[in-house]
Amino acid sequence: MAHDTLLEIRDLMTHFHLQEGIVRAVDGVSFEIRRGRTLGIIGESGCGKSVTANSILRLVPSPPGNIVNGRILLHRGDDSSDQEPVDLARLDPRGAEIRSIRGAEISMVFQEPMTSFGPMHTIGNQIMESILLHQSDVAASDARELAIENLRRVGIPRAEQIVDAYPHQLSGGMRQRAMIAMALSCSPRLLIADEPTTALDVTIQAQILELLTALQEEFGMAVMFITHNLGVIAEVADEVAVMYLGRIVEQSDVNELFDNPQHPYTQGLLNSIPHIDEEKLPRLRAIEGVVPDPYEIPRGCAFSDRCPSFMPGTCDRAMPGLDETGPGHRVRCFLFSEFEDELTEVADGR
Amino acid sequence: MAVENELLLEVNDLKMYFPIQKGLMKRTTGYVKAVDGVSLSIKRGETLGLVGESGCGKTTTGRCIVRVYRPTGGEIIFHIDDEEVNLNRLERQELKAFRRNMQMIFQDPFSSLNPRMTVLELVGEPLLAHGIARGQELEDRVAEMVNAVGLRVEHLPRYPHSFSGGQRQRIGIARALVQRPKLVVCDEPVSALDVSVQSQVVNLLQDLQSELDLTYLFVAHDMSVVRQVSNRIAVMYVGKLVEVAESEELLRNPKHPYSETLLSAVPRPYPHHAMQRLSLEGEPADPANAPPGCVFHPRCRYMEEICQTDVPALTELSPGHHVACHFADQLQLQGIDSASPSGS
C-alpha cells in the first residue's frame, strides 16, 4: 500500500433494515483518500454520500443501519511498515477507540452548524470540551486560550468575545466558521465536510471555501468534501467520485472528470446545470425521470431507467463493474466495460 | 416567452417594516426594514428575476406583492383587462376575490403541502375556496392541471409523502396555477431540489409560462438559474434594489459593485481555471440597523467618502439599466465572460 494513503475504503456496504425492506444506502463503495489531498464526493439525495461519511465515523444509527461488509482502513503511520492500519468498520461504535478517533484524528463539519453545536453551551465551552477530551496534555486553564486561537484562525473577528457567545447569537456564516474551528481544534488528519456550504449565501460560501483551502494548505490535512454542487467540487477537489444509488459510477482526477466525463449520469449532471459563463440555452438539458425509490432500484445498472444510452438486454441484465478506462479514470458503465465479452459485443453493435 | 409591452404590475416605493418588540409590555424599540422603498414593474408575459442574499428582503417583497403581508407603505397596482387595481384600495372581500390573480410557488416542497390532503384535495382546494368549480368540473380541471405539470391522474388519490421532492414541487405548481393566475411569485422554487430535478422544474416553469400566459416574479439566489428564466434581473441588498437591467446586460455589464461580487462568487464548473474571485469581506448589514449612506459601503471595494453619508438613488444609466451607486458611470466592473472557458 502506498504510504501516502490515509484512508482506504474497500467494498463498503451499509444497509438499513427497515419495515418496508432493506435500503442498500451504500452498496460496495471503494476509494482512497490521500494525505493532504481532497476527495470530492458528488451525488444527489439518496446516493449514499452522507451515509458513507457517517460510516467512516461510525455514526450510522444502529438499528436500523449496519455496516454489513467492507473495510475502512485508517493508515496512521507515515510509512506502511510502521504501523498496522485500524479497521474502523470493526470497531465498536460506542467504544473508546472510535471515540478517541472521532473529533481528534477524523472530524466532521455538517451542512447545518446547529447539528454539531448544542444550543445550551457557549461556543467556547464546546470547543474547549473537544480539546480537553482529546488532548490530555492541555491544562484546563489553557484550553480557553486555545479555543480563542482556534476561532481566530478561522477568521472570526473579536474571537475573545465570540468565545462566550451561544450558537444562536452568531450568523450562519460565523456559525459555520465556528464549527470548522471546533472540527480543527485537535488538528485532524482527515476532515469530512458534508455539504458545508449548501445552506450559505454565495458570497459567504466563497469565503468558507477559501478558508478551507487555506487551512488545508496550512495544516496539511486530507479532506473528504461531499456536495451536490458541481461548481464547488471543481473548485476544491483533487479527485472526484460520482455516486448514484449507493455506488460509485465514475471516479477520476478532477480535471479529467470535467474534461472527459464518461458515465451518462456524470454527463447528464454536467449538461443539466446552467453554465453562467456560456451562452444561455433556450432550455436546460435535463436528465429524464427521477431518482428511483430505494425499494425499487432497477435491475442491472441502477441508472438504466434514466439513461439516454440505455442498451436493452445489456444494461437491465447485470450491474457493470467499475472499470478503468484511462489512467486513474474508472467508470461503471457497459459502454466501457471490457469484462464480459458477450455484453461488450452488444455495446459495440449499438 | 412573448413579452408584451403592456404593464401587468407596478410597485411604487414599497416598504415593509417589522416592529421589534421588547419586554413585557411589547414596547416597539425599533424596526427591521426588510423592504425599504422598492419600486419595480413587470410586463405581461415577462419574468423578472429578483436576486440577493438571505435577509435582503427579496422574499418579503414577493410576499407583499401577493399580499401575504400588508405592506407598511407604498402602492401595488395591477393592470388587468384595461383596469387598474390598486391593492391598497380594495376592501377585504374584493381583495379575497382578487387573490386568484396572484399566486405563489414556495421553496420547500416538504413543508408547503398539507400532509393530510390528497393531491386532488390540494390542487382542488383553491378552486373550491374561490367558488370557481366543484364536483365533476373540479375534478376535470384538477386532472388537466396535474397532467400539465407532468404528473398523472393515478396520482390524484395519493398523499404528499409518497412523492419525491421534484414531484411535490410539481404539485405545488399545479396548486398555484389551477386558478389561472396572472402573476406568479416563484420563491426559490428549485433551490431545495436535486441538481437533475432542478433543470426539469426550470424547464416546466418556462413551458407553463408560454402555455398559460403567465408572468413571473422569480425570487432566487442562484444567478445562473435566474438568468436562465428571466428577461430582466433586479438585484436587491438590505431592503433596497441596487441594480435592475435586462438579464444578459446585467450579467455581462454589471454596474453595481454588489452585482459584480455576486457574479464572481458563483462557483464555476471549470477546475482548470482557478477563478480570480473578488472576495467580499464581512456579512450583509443588519436591516434593523442599516449603515448610513449606501447600505453596501462597509463591504464595497470602491468605497469613497460620499458613500458613507449619501444614499445613492436608483437612476437610469442607459435605457433600461438602473443602478444605485454614486460611481456607476465611472467604475469598470467585471461581468461574465462568455468567451471564457467552456468545459469541452
Image: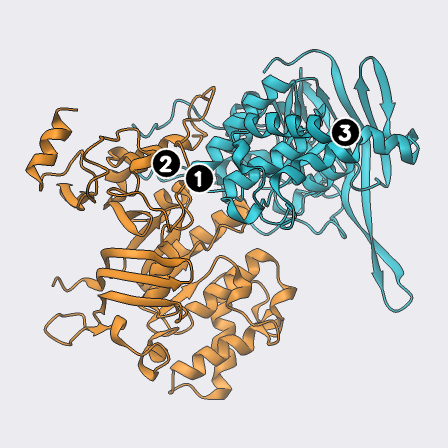
Chain colours: A orange, B cyan
Tell whether B150 sits left or right of A263: right
CA–CA distance in space, label 3 to label 2? 37 Å
Classed neighbour count for the residue bearing mark 2: other residues with Cα under 10 Å, few (<14), some (14–19), many (≥20): many
Tell whether B34 sits left or right of A177: right
Please identify the quadrant where the C terminus of chain A is shown. Answer: top left
Labels 3 and 1: the sequence-earlier one: 3
Q: Is residue B114 visible?
A: yes
Query: Residue B272, image x and y in percent?
Result: 30, 37
- Quarter holding residue A101: bottom left
The single residue placed furthest to the left in the displayed view is A341
Write down the chain letter for disc 2: A
Tell whether A237 sits left or right of B34: left
On whether disc 2 and disc 1 are found on a single subunit, the reply is no
On whether disc 3 and disc 1 are found on a single subunit, the reply is yes
Mark 3 touches mark 1? (CB < 8 Å): no
CA–CA distance in space, label 2 to label 1? 7 Å
Nearer to me, A307 or A241: A307
CA–CA distance in space, label 3 to label 1? 31 Å
Say which mark, if any, is on residue B100: 3
